[in-house]
Image (cartoon, rainbow, N blue to C red):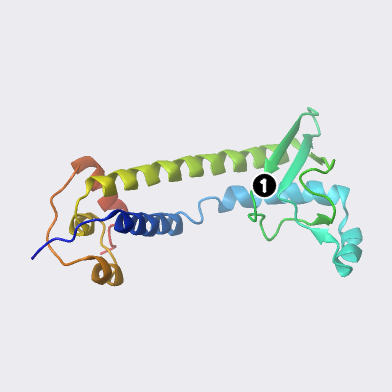
Amino acid sequence: MAKTRLSNEKREDLLTWMMKQYDEKHATRLDKPKAKAVKAMNAAIRKKYPEADMVVLRKYDVTRKDRCLRFVDAETNQFFGFDWGYQHEPEDLADVPAGRGCRSDDVFTVTPAGREAIEAMQSAREAAQSERRQKERDYRSFLEASRFVEDVHEVVPLPEDMQRRFMSGSPLVPVNEELVASIKSEFAVAA
């Protein structure tokens, strides 16, 4: 049976699917550092904007969750910031009065332990982003080296709908044994 040529469009579709699988598998990796950072941030925010005051502001819908926050360490008086990124603020992050934002002069005092938690979150997030970029490069390299959809399917078991969409069927001719083994182990189906 003839093999199905791996076009650029199919490569992009496969890469998108592989990265989605990667993201789902690693979705909870930042949960612990994120929870600690949010707890530290909320304590600092509520020290400046007490919950009793925020209840009144929420009643009139004049609050917001800020994605970028600035802090000062209570012991060292060092300033540092944290940016959750556009539309990535955690649901459980404390709100602040509306009209604030990334360009506001709000600086929240945080304990050294709080600073450590926030910096641990930043480091964990940077490590996760770096690992994700490397994994995307590995996947892209594998897909670029593969000539046929069947070659990819031999290493990465594709779901049936993708098989029907992309394949005409045939076995694999491996590309790079080390890379193939690494990717195969990541997508191994639990027996």
Residue at point 67%, 47% (across, down):
37
- Judging by the rendered image, the residue that carries numbered circle 1 is 37
Dividing the picture into quarters, in which one does residue 51 lie?
A: bottom right
User: Can you see residue 131?
Assistant: yes
Out of 78 and 114, give the one closest to the viewer.
78
Place of residue 152 in the rendered image (x, y in percent of width and height, measured from the top left): 23, 55
How would you rate the neighbour count of disc 1 (Cα within 10 Å): few for under 14, some for 14-19, many for 20 or more? many
Place of residue 29 in the rendered image (x, y in percent of width and height, measured from the top left): 50, 51
Quadrant of the drawing holding the N terminus: bottom left
Label 1, secondary structure: give it: helix
* Residue 66 relative to residue 61: left or right: left
Quadrant of the drawing holding the C terminus: bottom left
Residue at point 86%, 62% (across, down):
62
* Residue 17 relative to residue 143: left or right: right
- The answer to whether 69 is drawn above or below residue 152 in the figure is above
* Residue 24 relative to residue 122: left or right: left
Out of 135 and 166, give the one closest to the viewer.
166
Give amino acid for label 1. Answer: Ala
Residue at point 65%, 56% (across, down):
87
